[in-house]
Image (tube, rainbow, N blue to C red):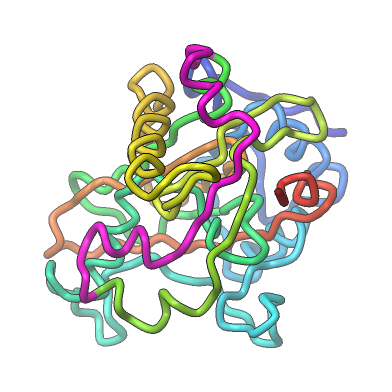
């Protein structure tokens, strides 16, 4: 493996990897990156110049690309890197109350990506293309550290239970009109265990998201109350790292052990990140997550 030069981003999780060119990554470099990913959950690379092809090539080292437009969720020919942006094709920006912008605002809820899919995400690889003068940070919370510190009285209420997830659940928190859009009803509700155990190091993390709506054995009201209580605990300030973007930054994080959210910016300013999610597989502990 390659020796990585790293410095901590937060006392409990996350590292910046220095002097590493992701556009030229090979299998040896990936093994070092993957080991850091398993241990630290969040990796930052600054000053990168990734083309879309470089972005995809790096992602494929982790596993299959997630393609929400494909019926079987496997990447089709011509798969394109997805923009997370308020910029229209003509260069103008979407208005603050436009449904597209409201969908971006839903990303400001604490979540793990793709918990509503039949195969959830292992990681997201996100890079900055256009950044705003102020705001627009992305925050990350370690559900591994939060779960470790959680009082047993609260842990015992979720341990051994499954949690149900649906895409429209998070969008309904922003706008009923947004939640009614067909794209948020493409997949049936998904059922995952509440705790994801990392198969490499055996460390546990709470697996939850803004898409979660029901806990096994509880009615709707008590389910949502417990989900909120758990989320509030693991997103306490002692578990959160906030990243202010610069063009060329790349962030890679473990969806099994980290929640994330966007933060507001001046919506009259253009902002563009590009994102690819990599689907989890049996080697990542997926099979053990099915209740």
The magenta region covers 149-177
Is 257 drawn above or below residue 273 in the view shown?
Answer: above
Left or right: 250, with 137 as reference point: right
The residue at the point 78 percent across, 55 percent down is 281
Residue 200 on image: x %, y %: 82, 32
Quadrant of image for the N terminus:
top right
Residue 168 in magenta? Answer: yes
Is 27 drawn above or below residue 184 in the view shown?
Answer: above
Q: Nearer the viewer, residue 285 or 105?
A: 285
Regarding residue 11, the answer to whether it shows in the image is no
The residue at the point 58 percent across, 61 percent down is 190
The residue at the point 43 percent across, 70 percent down is 83
Q: Nearer the viewer, residue 194 or 281?
A: 194
Is 60 drawn above or below residue 124 in the view shown?
Answer: below
Residue 161 on image: x %, y %: 60, 38
Q: Within the image, what quadrant is residue 41 found in?
A: top right
Total numbered labels placed on residues in the image: 0
Residue 197 on image: x %, y %: 72, 33
Q: Within the image, what quadrant is residue 139 found in?
A: top left
Left or right: 226, with 104 as reference point: right
Regarding residue 224, the answer to whether it shows in the image is yes
Residue 278 on image: x %, y %: 66, 59
Left or right: 194, with 83 as reference point: right
Left or right: 141, with 59 as reference point: left
Residue 99 in magenta? Answer: no
The residue at the point 37 percent across, 50 percent down is 220
Q: Nearer the viewer, residue 220 or 280?
A: 220
């Amino acid at each position: 493996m390659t020796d990585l030069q790293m410095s901590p981003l937060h006392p409990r999780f996350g590292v910046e990897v220095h002097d590493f060119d992701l556009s030229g990554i090979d299998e040896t470099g990936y093994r070092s990156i993957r080991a850091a990913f398993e241990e630290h959950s969040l990796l930052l690379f600054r000053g990168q110049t990734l083309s879309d092809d470089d972005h995809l090539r790096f992602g494929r080292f982790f596993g299959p690309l997630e393609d929400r437009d494909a019926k079987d969720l496997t990447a089709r020919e011509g798969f394109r890197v997805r923009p997370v942006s308020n910029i229209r094709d003509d260069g103008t920006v979407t208005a603050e109350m436009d449904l597209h912008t409201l969908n971006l605002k839903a990303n400001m809820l604490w979540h793990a990506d793709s918990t509503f899919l039949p195969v959830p995400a292992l990681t997201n690889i996100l890079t900055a293309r256009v950044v705003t003068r102020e705001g627009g940070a992305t925050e990350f919370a370690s559900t591994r550290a939060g779960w470790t510190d959680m009082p047993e009285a609260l842990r015992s209420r979720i341990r051994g239970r499954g949690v149900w997830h649906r895409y429209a659940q998070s969008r309904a928190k922003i706008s009923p009109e947004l939640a009614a859009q067909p794209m948020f009803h493409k997949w049936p509700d998904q059922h995952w265990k509440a705790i994801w155990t990392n198969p490499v190091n055996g460390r546990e993390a709470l697996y939850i998201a803004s898409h979660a709506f029901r806990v096994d054995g509880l009615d709707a009201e008590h389910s949502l109350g417990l989900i909120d209580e758990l989320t509030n605990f693991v997103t306490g300030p002692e578990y959160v790292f906030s990243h202010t973007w610069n063009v060329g930054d790349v962030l890679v994080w473990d969806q099994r052990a980290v929640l994330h959210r966007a933060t507001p910016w001046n919506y009259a300013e253009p902002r563009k990140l590009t994102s690819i999610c990599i689907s989890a597989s049996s080697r990542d502990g997926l099979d053990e997550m099915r209740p």
